[in-house]
Amino acid sequence: MSKEVNVIDGPPEDLGEKKNATVVQEHPKADRDSPGEPEEDHSDDSRESDTTYVNGHPVIRDGFDVSKFLISVRDDGDPALTFRSIVLGSVFTALSSVITMLYVFKPTYMQVSFVFLQLLVYCFGEAWAYVTPSPEKFKSRWIRNILKFLNFGQPFGIKEHVVAALIASSGNNGLNGVEVYAVERLFYDKNVNALTAVLGTFSMCLCGFVLAGVLRPLIVYPAEMVYWSTLPQVVLFQNLHFDRHANRERLRKFGWALLFAAVWEVFPAYIITWFGGLSVFCLASMGASTSTRTIFSTIFGGASSNEGLGLLNFSLDWQYIQSTYLSLPFKQQFNTWIGYVVWYIAMLGLYYGNAWNAKDFPFMSSSLFHSNGTVLSTTSMLDDQGIIDQEKLAEVGIPHLTSSTVWGFFSQNLAIGALISHVILFSGKDMIQAWKQARNRTQPDIHYQAMLKYKEVPMWWYWVLLVLCFVAGVVVTTKGDTTLPVWGYIVSLLLGAFIAPFSCILYGLNGSGVSTNQISKMVAGAVHPGRPLANLYFACWSHQVILLAVNLANWLKVGQYTKVPHRVMFGTQIYGTLLGAALNYVVMTTVVTSQREILLDPIGNSVWSGSTLQGFNSQAITWSLAKDMYGLNGRYVIVPLGILIGFFFPVIHWFLNRAYPRLKELPLNTTFIFVTSGLRYYGNTSWIWSSIAVGVFSQVWLRRRKPKIYNKYNYLIGAGLDGGSQVVIFVLSFAVFGASGQERPFPAWWGAPKDTNPDHCI
């Protein structure tokens, strides 16, 4: 059958503007029959005729192309739930959850790279198969059975690999609940009792799973729900197991990248901290007056927490840069870059325009302040139950926020409003069609059809889990010291259930989402005025419903691509989530106890920072005073109005697209622009320009000019760099940074200054 195709001999044009997701990949047409390659399907010749080829390789533009050309439909029927997969998953859950919890107390929050976990699991899984004796060498039947159960001498299959890696990655699903306990310890001098810790963690960790189960036809089954940020991992899973002859070269490159990052990370993190922020402007201002240096630090400084905007400040510290911008599609990064431009203008304009008396407070900080600029202690306005005491409040006054915090809150609300209208207008019709197809089992995606032979998870499993989580939450709210009534707990779950579908759809289509925690805090403040602790718990439960729905849907999609049975995915995700939450809790208590003073400091330092937890607490306090701070007569009334304002931007965008169809070629997404424009209102910022440089190199140059190298090594090298830097930070945190209680700073010198910021701004 003849086909008409577009053939491009040179670099491919960036075609991501035409669809909801952007990936340009090579897929050798001549090698279609090689192991692991999806079989060519001619069932949709109309789509085939639209395919663009680069040197004989199809360009991946959307979810249908991903299913057809990029991801293999191959299913070898190998076992998924084994002793080896559970053991490896458990071991690496410990690694990922501990490192991620440590980054909660760092100037910039990061998570362990999934590709790094994936490759570590693979190495250990292969070693397990290689060094253990084969059962066939033994004559005794019971010995053979035991060794087979232990997977000794058995090949390490793709499904085992997927299960172990996903268990490890799900270990951070309960992180938000543990962060609430950390805030209680730091700012309310309360140690969570055992009942609240156990039942609360169980309820918060799993409360969103049922929603992902109900919404599977909408957020998992359709081909367009690709979850682009995890697509590299799916490709790597299949390459490692379906194309084994190339593994030695891949793993060698990965090992060298990991070793290089591990050795290098010691320098910017410990010995030469100046490498964490290279700024020509900061160096040029060293001999200037204090006032000039202060301005330069505000604009160009960013190596320390809450120092400044980090404009043209480049970091060589990979622990903050990370490989995120090696994998996010061009369309996503394009909107991010626009958001940063808005962020620079807004932050500087508000501060130097003295909005809300901004100059009376630090340029960047997530703490609360008195009107004279001194830090306000949250306990100074609370009674013994953690409730706002009106008499104490009258003495200390209504808290003040920095202009950076106000902008951060406002932009988050803009993004939430834009999220709802954007999904309805730009994805509504497709989602309705997908629901109908799944209900009739006519979803055309070949991977969905291939999974029909496996037993689905009965809905009653999800409902039983929901009942258990709900009851545990009721016990916590009635018996625990949360100040949150049962009816408020129910409202929090309902709010999360309303927002979750929008977040799941946006994330599935674009590979990135929106932080919706702000709307949870707003509603909590409205229904529970004067109760900051109640606000924390309300927002946590509500946000966890959204977060876990997104996470589980993401992993269910990975399972669909790799043909892991539905019931195995369900059970192992629950196990990994609970195990990781327990480990998060242990690390949290250790760090909060040993680094309490620096975590309470509104500035922090280049190693430890309480900015993340301070931000949580500041929002809880301020939203518990919603009427006074954000009401019609409040100082920050613009913040809640952000949701309404943000809602109309996609509406305007949609009408402009209809009036001027050529605008559709521009990959604008106002939701992501708003997210980026206020996401960095505290913390370390020197890595931003480095991440932009990485993104331009990877997505604009390497992907288009050297697609073969991009497809083969882009994600692999990024994973090695992530892994090496994160392992070293894990070791340094306990060895020299004081996570275990004993700090051993490197001797001060010009490259690692003690009394000034690492980038030598004031």
Image (cartoon, rainbow, N blue to C red):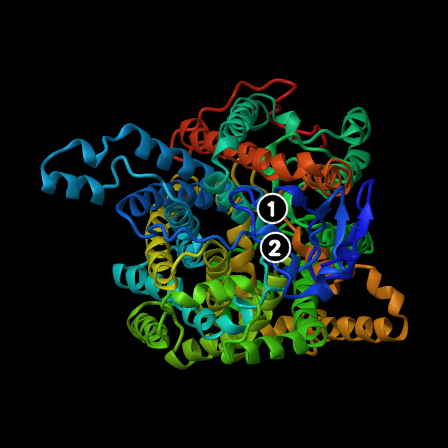
In the picture shown, does residue 495 fall above or below 87? below
Q: Amino acid at mark 2?
A: Glu
| Residue of label 1 | 32
Residue located 59% across and 26% down the image:
268
- In front of the other: 595 or 587: 587
The C terminus sits in image quarter: top right
The 10 Å Cα crowd at callout 2, few under 14, some 14 to 19, many 20 or more, is few
In the picture shown, does residue 653 fall above or below 296? below
State the separation of the CA atoms marked 2 and 1: 7 Å
In the picture shown, does residue 58 fall above or below 313? below
In the picture shown, does residue 288 fall above or below 449? above
| Residue of label 2 | 40
Q: Which mark is residue 395?
A: none
- In front of the other: 236 or 297: 236
Relative image position of residue 236 (x, y in whole percent): 53, 43
Relative image position of residue 112 (x, y in whole percent): 49, 43
Relative image position of residue 131 (x, y in whole percent): 29, 28
Residues at discs 2 and 1 in contact (Cβ within 8 Å): yes
Res 368 quadrant in image: bottom right
> Is residue 97 rendered to the left or right of residue 334?
left
